[in-house]
């Protein structure tokens, strides 16, 4: 008998196909009524394959009393209540490392596009303004500027290497100082004050909710840029919108938002914001690697072996 699992949402197509082929998979996102779904499948379900931001808390875990493992597609596990899982002896896994380089590429592109205003320049050309109004206004260089990395983990380090290759200087802040060759700032406000571009790469979750607040944005100032590839929750989004509208910071590059995919439409009218639809890891190769690792963790667990990337 194949182990029975629940898939929480529609995810990467190839991963979904393999999960459904190798396991007896029940699709929660297609269930017309959740209570009936759990009543039917709960006695036999041993695994949960999670995609997207749906909360996985103690209530959901208790609805699956035989649950042994939650295998997450992605690095961030802020949607999963880790304390609830630990109390119930449920293993939680994620998919780190396989997306570091791709996300770092996206971050560098977002930094360049935000500071150099390449998307706005293309829109200027497409609208016929080059011929009618003359050259697009000058932007500023990223070379020689200071990139403040808020969250110098594995992805942050990969971004720093790319930024250095472009001539940027690096500073950082973490909860704990690292053995890193870059100047350290004691808090996010100090980092913002000392940076031309503040890059947010922290995990999501309660500990970092609205970490980038008015004090941080004021420290960044009207010549500073904010780039976020972490979680939308890390920034006070309505406040950021107001600061951009009032030109209290120079610009922002955002790959993540609080209520994805619903982005506040006021952002669309801004000429000092570059917006990506959460494409940090969105390449064919990386998404396959993420899915392969999610599946491998499930295979190993059900074979009685240690999982590869255990969180709790």
Image (spheres, rainbow, N blue to C red):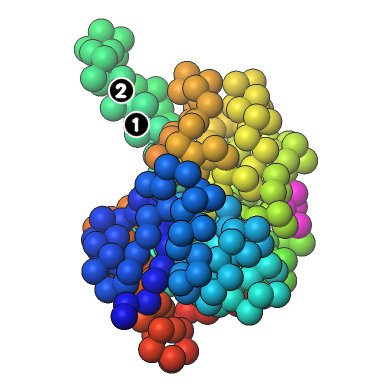
Note whether 224 is above or below 174 in the view shown: above
- The answer to whether the residues at label 1 and label 2 have Cβ atoms under 8 Å apart is yes
Return the residue at label 1. Answer: 119
- Residue 306 spot, x, y in % from top left: 47, 89
| Towards the viewer: 144 or 184 | 184
Callout 2: 10 Å neighbours few (<14), some, many (20+)?
few
- Residue 245 spot, x, y in % from top left: 60, 21
Magenta-drawn stretch contains 61? no
Note whether 282 is above or below 113 in the view shown: below
* Quadrant holding the C terminus: bottom right
Callout 1: 10 Å neighbours few (<14), some, many (20+)?
some
Count of picture labels: 2
Residue 252 located left or right of residue 8: right
Mark 1 → mark 2, Cα distance in angstroms: 6 Å
Return the residue at label 2. Answer: 123
- Residue 121 spot, x, y in % from top left: 33, 27
Tell me, yes or no, if residue 203 can be seen here: no
* Quadrant holding the N terminus: bottom left
Q: Residue at x 23, y 20 (%)?
A: 126
Tell me, yes or no, if residue 60 can be seen here: yes
Residue 85 located left or right of residue 286: right
SS assignment at label 1? helix
Stretch of the chain drawn in magenta = 187-191
Q: Which residue is drawn at 41% across and 84% down?
A: 302
To which quarter of the image does residue 91 belong?
bottom right
């Amino acid at each position: 008998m194949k182990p029975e699992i629940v898939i929480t949402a529609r995810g990467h197509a190839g991963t979904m196909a393999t999960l459904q082929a190798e396991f007896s998979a029940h699709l929660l996102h297609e269930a017309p009524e959740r209570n009936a779904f759990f009543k039917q499948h709960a006695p036999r379900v041993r695994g949960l394959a999670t995609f997207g931001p749906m909360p996985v808390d103690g209530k959901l875990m208790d609805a699956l009393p035989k649950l042994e493992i939650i295998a997450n597609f992605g690095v961030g596990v802020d949607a999963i209540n880790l304390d609830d899982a630990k109390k119930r002896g449920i293993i939680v896994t994620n998919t780190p490392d396989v997306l570091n380089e791709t996300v770092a590429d996206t971050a560098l592109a977002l930094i360049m596009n935000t500071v150099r205003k390449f998307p706005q320049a293309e829109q200027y050309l497409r609208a016929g303004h080059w011929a009618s109004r003359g050259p697009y206004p000058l932007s500023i260089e990223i070379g020689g500027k200071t990139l403040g990395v808020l969250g110098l983990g594995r992805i942050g380090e990969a971004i720093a290497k790319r930024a250095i290759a472009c001539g940027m200087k690096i500073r950082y802040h973490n909860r704990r100082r690292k053995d890193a060759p870059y100047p350290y700032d004691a808090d996010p406000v100090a980092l913002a004050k000392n940076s031309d571009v503040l890059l947010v790469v922290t995990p999501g979750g309660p500990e970092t909710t609205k970490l980038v607040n008015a004090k941080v944005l004021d420290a960044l100032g009207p010549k500073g840029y904010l780039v976020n590839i972490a979680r939308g929750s890390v920034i006070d989004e309505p406040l950021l919108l107001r600061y951009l509208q009032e030109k209290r910071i120079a610009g922002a590059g955002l790959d993540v938002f609080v209520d994805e995919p619903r982005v506040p439409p006021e952002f669309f009218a801004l000429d000092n914001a570059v917006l990506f639809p959460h494409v940090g890891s969105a390449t064919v190769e990386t998404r396959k690697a993420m899915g392969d690792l999610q599946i491998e963790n499930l295979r190993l667990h059900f074979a009685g072996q240690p999982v590869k990337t255990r969180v709790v």
